[in-house]
Image: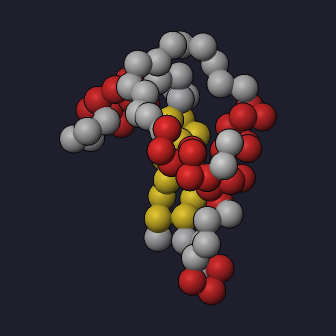
Amino acid sequence: MDTIQALKTRRCVRAYTREPVPKQVIEELIDCARLAPTARNAQPWEFVVVSDPAVLRQIAAITDYGKFIVEAPLCIVVLYY
């Protein structure tokens, strides 16, 4: 799949199974995210993987548009500084 096709056919998913996400998939996603370009390669972010259901509930409760997070098996929190 090329980039244009990926952009045109992307979709949002807000219904999740409780199936665990393999660690290799999580690491690959974070590795791709950290490759995003930044000025002077500052990379002013940290990625935190949250899979504890209690913490997912807390995150969902404080968001305006992320209530669906409580249903996800995990959430990758991006911290920018």
Asked which quadrant contains residue 22, the reply is: top right
The residue shown at (68%, 42%) is 1
- Choose between 51 and 27: the one closer to the eye: 27
Asked which quadrant contains residue 60, the reply is: top left
Measured from the top left, where is residue 72 in percent x and y? 47, 23
Relative to 43, say whether 71 is above or below: above
Q: Is residue 24 left or right of residue 20?
A: right
Measured from the top left, where is residue 28 in percent x and y? 73, 44
* Residue 62 appearing in the image: no
Q: Is residue 67 left or right of residue 79?
A: left
User: Furthest residue to the bottom?
Assistant: 40
* Residue 64 appearing in the image: yes
Measured from the top left, where is residue 10 in percent x and y? 48, 39
The residue shown at (68%, 63%) is 35
Relative to 58, say whether 80 is above or below: below
The residue shown at (53%, 22%) is 73
Measured from the top left, where is residue 79 in percent x and y? 48, 58
